[in-house]
Image (tube, helix red, strand yellow):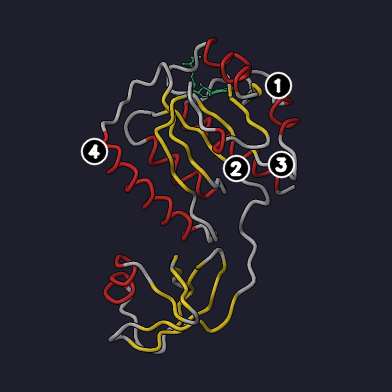
Amino acid sequence: MQRYFANKVNKNIILGDGDVHHLLHVMRAKKGDEIEAVADNKLYACIIDSLTPLVIKVNYEIPTDSELNEDVTLFFALAKGEKIDFVVQKATELGANKIVLLKTERCVVKFDDKTLKHKLERFEKIAKEASEQSHRLKIPEIMGVVDLKNIPSELLSDINLVAYEKEAGSTDSLFNNVNKGKSVSIMIGPEGGFSEEEVNLLTSKYNFRRVSLGKRILRTETAAVYALSVIGALLEK
Ligand code: SAH
């Protein structure tokens, strides 16, 4: 069944403009059709009460459990081409709650303010569609760009991990640092990796712990997907 993220006002469901268009012109909805809507992190079975004006009524709440039990934040260094699009989509499917775009020493990509605004809108759209597709109750927040040297403390989690390529080896460090009951952040570096100074700053200033993602060096987008997959599996064990 078609599912939309929406607002709920009393028993009425209010869709955004793009979703109204999708419902009426792509799905060709009729009066009496049923849809599902997610509002305030809850899933509702709804019915289309009228088309002009569009009135959608909540029928009942559908109990559902599709979120990780802990908040997971991905810090992802600005990467080239469509890599960020890919990572936003996959991180959303894998249950991340926040995606923080990160500027590091070796990031070659730079966005001016105007480009960043457009990019963020695009990433938010990708996250919304991925949340709908993966039946989530939340759309991850996308933030940034944050400088590694100046990370606002409210973005940090109970446990903060940096995937450091020079730690490549046993994955014990990752397994031992993800615990139920604790929110977790994972930071992934750019194509050129982190400098030693950056990793030292992360560990001394913000209490990040270095972790390995196995013996092989992964591309930045693979590293993000790998780390979030393992974290999700550990939290849902
Ligand atoms: N150019 C670097 C690799 C960068 S990989 C080099 O050749 O050493 C991009 C990012 O992915 C890294 O900064 C790190 O965050 C992560 N990463 C990739 N493989 C990893 C591994 N085996 N262990 C830990 N982190 C890894």
Determine if the C-beta at disc 4 is less than 8 A from ligand 1.
Answer: no
> Of marks 4 and 2, which one's residue comes earlier in the chain?
2
**Residue type at mark 4?**
Lys
Residue 143 picture location, percent across and down? 43, 40
**Which one is nearer the viewer's eye here, 95 or 150?**
150
> Of marks 1 and 4, which one's residue comes earlier in the chain?
4
Q: Work out how far the residue at label 2 is from the one at label 3, CA to CA, in angstroms.
A: 9 Å
| Residue denoted by label 1 | 170
Q: Work out how far the residue at label 1 is from the one at label 4, CA to CA, in angstroms.
A: 42 Å
Tell me the SS state at disc 2.
Answer: strand
On the picture, is 124 further left or further right than 141?
left
Residue 68 picture location, percent across and down? 64, 51
Mark 4: give few (<14), some (14-19) or many (20+) Cα within 10 Å: few
**Residue type at mark 3?**
Lys
> Of marks 1 and 2, which one's residue comes earlier in the chain?
2
| Residue denoted by label 3 | 182
The numbered dot on residue 72 is 2
**Residue type at mark 2?**
Val
CB-based contact (under 8 Å), mark 3 and mark 1: no
Q: Work out how far the residue at label 3 is from the one at label 1, CA to CA, in angstroms.
A: 22 Å
Mark 2: give few (<14), some (14-19) or many (20+) Cα within 10 Å: many
At horizontal 54% and vertical 20% (from top left) the residue drawn is 217
Tell me the SS state at disc 1.
Answer: loop
The numbered dot on residue 114 is 4
Image: 62 above or below 179: below
Tell me the SS state at disc 3.
Answer: loop
On the picture, is 109 further left or further right than 223?
left
Q: In which quarter of the image is residue 157?
A: top right
